Amino acid sequence: MTVQTPSPIVQVLPETAPFSEEQRFWLNGFFAGLLSLDNAGVTALSPVENAAVMAEAEDGAPWHDPSLEIAERMKLAEGKPLPRRLYAAMAQQDCGQCGYVCETYSAAIASGTEGRLNLCAPGGKETLRQVKALVEETGSSAPAAPAEAAPASELGAHGRCRENPALATFLSRRKLNGEGSEKETWHVEFDLSECGLDYVVGDAFGVVAQNDTRLVDAVIALLGAQPDADINGKSLRDKLMADCALGPAPDALFQLISYVTGGEARARARRLAAGEDPDGDLDRLDVLGTLHKFSQARLSAEAFVEALDPLQPRLYSISSSYHATPGRITLTVDAVRYRIGSRPRWGVASTFLAERVQPGDTVPVYVQRAHGFGLPADPATPIIMCGPGTGVAPFRAFLHDRQATKASGRNWLFFGHQRRTCDFFYEEELQAMKDQGFLTNLTLAWSRDGEKVYVQDRMRERGGELWSWLEKGAHFYVCGDAKRMARDVERALVDVVAEHGGRSVDEAVAYVAALRKAGRYQADVY
């Protein structure tokens, strides 16, 4: 049986650092999970180097908390060395979508070994602008232009990194919401048997999606170009479908427009490229919206494509177990659809998986190794999982894995969503696990069935039992939104420890930080 062994946690603060024991627990807890990578060409700081830099930079403020806004993180990181300020600028989720974690990505940029400054997908444009500003301010040796693709011999293992994806066959999708739901969530299945990929629960699955054809055709029409125009050996249409991000307009596009326009249009484009919002419409300016706004600009297809950001792969928590269903993998995906003004917008990968890819199609994919998120090494260890909405995905995988491997540890799932009648994902199988006694506790919360109840409310209600599980060695997991839900869950856990553990708030904070330090509090946030 294969089990995931927790990675060792780097001890950051030296014993001589001027902090109390409670502060030390808190600060070290925030640094848990900053682990080295096995990607080709990526070199993480050694524990000694990391400790030296962090000890020099840290002033006691949790400036790397993903729930903090970037402006607040940057203020707290003032005066720190460049790697630390770059680190503060990033999305702070350690999602791995860039091919690094935040710490090693910032270190690679600072050292000049990584020239691509736009890889932080969750951080988006605000992170890119801040990173560029820091690189320019410090005169870092990192080149401004994206690095050239590495030769095949230097890429990571096939299907194990974004630069070298494998081809998996799309099998099926089924909608998880019932009639009356305000959400659109899909259970998506791929066949891995031909590409030979495997995975461990807790890992993420990278999907290299394509843009919506309707959006691509609209962009080409506004550009006034021919769809079959040759762009480095590909037609313009194929290039925009597969290679170019068509979401928020990049600064480079505004710069390009400023070069080919004059007067007020040039002034507006320059201000937009500098991060200003002269007309109050920056939040609506995706690539199509920008072409419409500056319809007088005459852009060549080649220059236009050059100004766009590359289309990034998207990562999803895996909701299946290789032990239970070898050769297959499933995801739990919310389809993102919304309007800005009168225009519909679509999430690239989510609607690709929800409607555009068809059974039998092959899709470039890769498995992203988990960093500090996985089942305990001892199968007898009890686990508590908190995953509302699509956050249930990795915990469905945990349960299927523990069931397939006959793990003896107790299992407790907190699940919540809007309405029980239409938003109870995987109800039949979870209820069957509960009836069999395998799922010891299934605690539910519904925010639109009368009184608003959330998973953190249920945690407080069941606080005594939750505290008992923790004291008996349980591992606690949370998956979901980093800025709201995960933060609220951690606060609820602190409240439970304070009330039922007979501790002060500071002592409860230190207790939870110690759980994190020991690898017993793990988060998969986005």
Image (cartoon, rainbow, N blue to C red):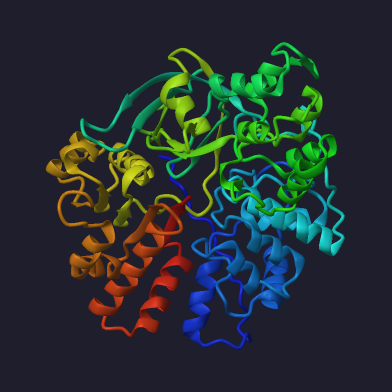
Closer to us: 279 or 375: 279
Closer to us: 115 or 252: 252
**Residue drawn at point x = 44 percent, y = 56 percent:** 523
Query: Relative to 113, is 87 on the left or the right?
Result: left
Q: Is residue 103 above or below residue 261?
A: below
Q: Is residue 70 above or below residue 435?
A: below
Closer to us: 264 or 9: 264
| Quadrant including the N terminus | top left
Name the spot of residue 446 as percent of width and height, x first: 21, 50
Q: Is residue 511 above or below residue 521?
A: below
**Residue drawn at point x = 70 percent, y = 23 percent:** 223
**Residue drawn at point x = 59 percent, y = 46 percent:** 281
Q: Is residue 36 visible?
A: no
Q: Is residue 299 above or below residue 446?
A: above
Name the spot of residue 252 as percent of width and height, x first: 76, 41
Q: Residue at the left extreme?
A: 435
Name the spot of residue 513 as percent of width and height, x first: 44, 72
Q: Quadrant of residue 434?
A: top left
Q: Is residue 21 visible?
A: yes
Closer to us: 218 or 125: 218
Query: Relative to 224, is 30 on the left or the right?
Result: left
- Image mark count: 0
Name the spot of residue 370 as percent of width and height, x first: 52, 47
